[in-house]
Amino acid sequence: MSYHLLREDTMPTTISSENIPIKLWLDDMEEGALQQAKNLANLPFAFHHIAIMPDAHFGYGMPIGGILATRDEVVPNAVGVDIGCGMCAVKTSLESLDRVELKRVMQSIRATIPLGFKHHKKPLAHACMPKIADSLPARRTSIVEREYEHARKQIGTLGGGNHFIEMQRGGNGAIWFMIHSGSRNLGYQVARHYNKLAGNLNKKHRSSVPTSWQLAHLRLSSAEGQMYLHEMNYCVQFAYANRMAMCKRVEEALLENVTPDITFSEPINIAHNYAASETHYGTNVCIHRKGATRAEPEDIGIIPGSQGSASYIVRGKGNPESFSSCSHGAGRKLGRKQAQRMLNLAHEKKILDEKGIIHALRGKRDLEEAASAYKNIDEVLARQDDLVEIIEILQPLAVIKG
């Protein structure tokens, strides 16, 4: 089944004032994020154009919700600190789940999956971890090897911020669950190390890219560039394995608290923070997706809403103007501190309570993840009708936030 959200025009708006064009799938971009997009367009190694998705907002160096194609260079901050962060969605054979069962399931999940900054007390088995390649580029200083034992306690943990575990109901009544998480401290350590290394090398070689742009870069053919790609890819694999480990815990919670007869579909498991070698406009380039999902023809993707709105399973259309990409979510409307200052806790709780959602709003601090802190997901989907088609709409039933 496919769904359509009406919109008058899904053609991107083009800004042509910089060295290469910027194509925007939104018309309400904050000034700081727009300036970051302009910086990207003026990188001497940026290729063809910059693509900005409808969920875009300010990030470190590059807007979250952006796609950058480069020739011969990789930019750690254009991937971000949560390397491999992404989504996992699983359809179950359940056709109903009452409130009492939901609460038991969520309680079990909280008991078995560490949240926020919490880790497992004991390291998980080596079999849970991606294997480190036997051969690494010469002159290595492997952050992955240094952090490996710590990462064994982090795999199968949710993390904080906007990471979540959510129980959902599909259009045909089927029960789904969805997980949003990444590479935890491992990805952060890799990102921080290589961004700093790139900055030092750029300073040494007098790069023309201003340090204030926070877009330090590494030559792809260099030993440092190759090591970054190796360690970045390991973090992508780790984030994938992290979500799969949590999937197993959620499945166990459902089997133990509802019925042992549940079956589960093959997980949809995708990343939205990474760099990859791809061919676009007849040229081999390094595509950086920071808060963006690949949407090649027949790619199945996940675009989540807030804890108070629908999430979407989508199929890509392979639009070359977006470098075959789409948004990774609704996108923030308010910054975290801004949401805590401006939003009313009682009002935000009432919005979710009236929808019958078992939610994660407890105190004023939680307002950073309130539904009103995010853009309207329906509008975000409508703005990218030329990038994806909707194949499933999932409504929230209960959510755990990191």
Image: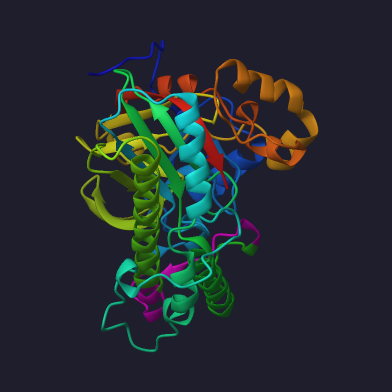
**Quadrant assignment for the N terminus:** top left
Give the residue furthest to the bottom: 139
Residue closer to the observer: 371 or 273: 371
Residue closer to the observer: 220 or 185: 185
Is residue 49 at all visible to an observer of this figure? no
Asked where in the image residue 234 lies, by quadrant, the reply is bottom left
Above or below, comparing residue 235 to residue 169 in the picture: below
Residue closer to the observer: 75 or 337: 337
Asked where in the image residue 159 lies, by quadrant, the reply is bottom right
Q: Is residue 4 left or right of residue 26?
A: left
Q: Picture coordinates of residue 97 (x, y %)? A: 40, 26
Residue closer to the observer: 75 or 48: 75
Q: Is residue 287 left or right of residue 279?
A: right
- Residue at 48% from the left image edge and 46% from the top image edge: 108
Q: Picture coordinates of residue 132 (x, y %)? A: 31, 76
Q: Is residue 115 left or right of residue 265?
A: right
Above or below, comparing residue 399 to residue 137 in the picture: above
Q: Picture coordinates of residue 88 (x, y %)? A: 36, 44
Q: Magenta residues?
A: 212-227
Give the residue furthest to the right: 341
- Residue at 59% from the left image edge and 60% from the top image edge: 118
Query: Residue 8 lies in magenta, yes or no?
Result: no
Q: Picture coordinates of residue 57 (x, y %)? A: 58, 39
- Residue at 52% from the left image edge and 35% from the top image edge: 399
